[in-house]
Image (cartoon, grey):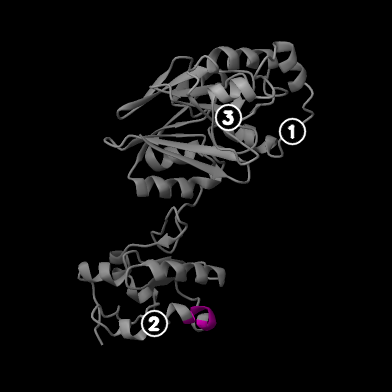
Amino acid sequence: MIFRQLFDSTSSTYTYILGCEESREAIIIDPVFEQHERDTALLRELGLRVKYTLDTHVHADHVTGAWRMKETYGAQIGLSAEYDAAGVDVPLKDGTVLSFGNYSLLTRATPGHTGGCCTFVTHDRTMAFTGDCLMIRSAGRTDFQSGDVHIMWHSIKERIFTLPDTCLIYPAHDYMGRTVSSVAEEKKHNPRIGGDAREEDFAGYMNNLGLPHPKLLEIALPANMQCGKPDHQTEDQPRWGPVNLTFAGVPEVDADWVARKLDELMVLDVRTEAEYHGELGHIPGAALIPLDELRDRISEIPKDRPVVAICQSGKRSAMATQILKSGGFERVANIPGGMIHWARLALPREEN
């Protein structure tokens, strides 16, 4: 199974991607609205199509990216039926099974943090995505959103700690940089519910956390009750062209599109002069500024047109886009594959 763990530093949220190598179907758990481009870039590079978007619960500290995933992939949105939220395609209940290719996730109801929290367990019970119920050496707060410390006690003890000791625990959040734990570790070391802790110990600990309410509470809750659908249309694509952002954060545009739009673009070649006039030639009208000189000569580049950068293989020009962006250029993209790919496509070029 393909597995990736991603992190949003603003809300300390983990997003998880699980994919099938054969069918290329995928499930994404707890996506963050603002990280949509990052997530779709990785999905695109891995060749995965999102079948289901799942949230472990209605979050109070960030807006879910579920609606954006539905718009992009037609993914079905899964959320606990307890919330009666708008826009849900699959109202989740205890025992709901969601398949993606050769794999599946089992839904276990684990209320306590909120009334509708769910834990998702892989078919072989080796991984559990516990949301804000059981966290690494911690547990989610129970002081709002229909939270109940006694219900959470039973959720953890009876629905999570009954999984195999070797089952890995992946929470929705961590605020100390911890990424994964296990059932055995949390049963032994969790300071709130592990070891010899009894229900009254757990309740005493949880009821005295004294935490302030999340800063985005008034924004996140209403938005997440409609699966993250905004009140206005978002603009994913830059208006000047079909730009894709890679998982590495590099804006890219296809070579064949550039070839059709040469009159509307500035093509920046960042190779050496010898390469510019060498065997691969260069794009007609391309301006030559070697990468090593770009920072010192950036003022030579006009801002009245989008700038597309190219080199031999697309690597140096990827760096050029970052230099341009840091220099105040907003309409900029790399041509992946560089002149090698351009020549393979037999696109127009000059050799001297």
At label 3, which amino acid type do we have?
Met
Any part of residue 335 in sight: yes
What SS does tag 3 mark?
A: loop
How far apart in space, not on screen, are marks 2 and 3 (Cα)? 51 Å
**In what element is the residue under mark 1?**
loop
Seen at 59% across and 14% down, the residue is: 157
Q: Quadrant of residue 279?
A: bottom left
Tag 3 or tag 2, which sits nearer the N-term?
Answer: 3
Question: Would residue 316 appear left or right of 350 to someone viewing this image?
Answer: right
- Residue that numbered label 1 is attached to: 213
User: Residue 143 at what x, y percent from top left?
Assistant: 73, 23
x and y percent of residue 20 in the render?
Answer: 32, 34
Amino acid under disc 1: His
Tell which tag, 1 or 3, sits nearer the viewer: 1
State the mark number for residue 287.
2
Observer-side mark, 2 or 3, equals: 2
Query: Earlier along the polypeptide chain: callout 2 or callout 1?
Result: 1
Residue under the point 71% across and 24% down: 144
Q: Which residues are magenta?
A: 293-297
Quadrant placement of the N terminus: top left
* Kind of residue indicated by mark 2: Ala
